[in-house]
């Protein structure tokens, strides 16, 4: 959205949230990307309503996924502009506190974990980070 409309929609959401990005708006955006996933989870719950293990797993996921926190607006806008829209971290042009962030300086062992159906951070996007860090390939899992 930022590519075609700039930061205006995000700034409007923050303004509507009184200077914060409401967690409820973040959740709505996540759900609207793939609404069929939300419907599917609800239908699976109905199918398995007599299975206590399924119901508990559903409840735990809902507690984690649905109760998002508000995000300070300035921080949210910085994230959208620098990380999502302009992709400065991967491009090597991200500056924090006057210093350029160098992913190549990361040389500790890494465990990269991604969901195969994650539509917020797709697995190939996460795994591409391994090419930018200084961690030897043998130490990336």
Image: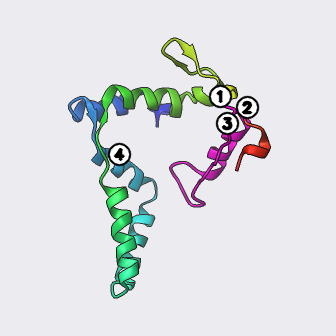
Furthest residue to the left? 18
Q: Closer to the camera: disc 3 or disc 1?
A: 3
Tell me the SS state at disc 1.
helix
Which badge, 3 or 1, is on the more N-terminal residue?
Answer: 1
Residue under label 4, please give it.
Answer: 26
Residue under label 2, please give it.
Answer: 134
Region in magenta:
106-134
For the residue pair 37 and 110, the one nearer the viewer reads as 110
Alpha carbon distance from label 3 to label 2: 8 Å
The structure residue drawn at horizontal position 46% and vertical position 37%, both measured from the top left corner, is: 1
Alpha carbon distance from label 4 to label 2: 33 Å
Q: State the image quarter where residue 64 is shown.
A: bottom left
Alpha carbon distance from label 3 to label 1: 11 Å
Which badge, 1 or 2, is on the more N-terminal residue?
Answer: 1
Q: Residues within 10 Å of mark 1 (few under 14, many from 20)?
A: some
> Is mark 4 in CB contact (under 8 Å) with mark 2?
no
Tell me the SS state at disc 4.
helix
The structure residue drawn at horizontal position 55% and vertical position 27%, both measured from the top left corner, is: 86
């Amino acid at each position: 959205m930022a590519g075609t409309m700039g930061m205006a929609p995000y700034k409007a959401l923050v303004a509507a949230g009184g200077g914060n990005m409401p967690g409820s708006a973040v959740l709505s955006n996540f759900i609207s990307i793939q609404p069929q996933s939300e419907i599917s989870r609800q239908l699976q719950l109905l199918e398995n309503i007599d299975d206590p293990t399924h119901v508990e797993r559903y409840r735990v996921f809902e507690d984690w996924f649905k109760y998002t926190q508000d995000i300070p607006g300035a921080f949210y806008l910085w994230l959208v502009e620098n990380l999502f829209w302009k992709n400065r971290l991967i491009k090597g042009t991200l500056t924090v506190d006057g210093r350029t962030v160098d992913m190549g300086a990361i040389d500790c062992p890494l465990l990269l974990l991604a969901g195969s159906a994650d539509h917020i951070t797709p697995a190939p996007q996460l795994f591409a980070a391994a090419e930018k860090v200084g961690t030897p390939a043998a130490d990336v899992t």
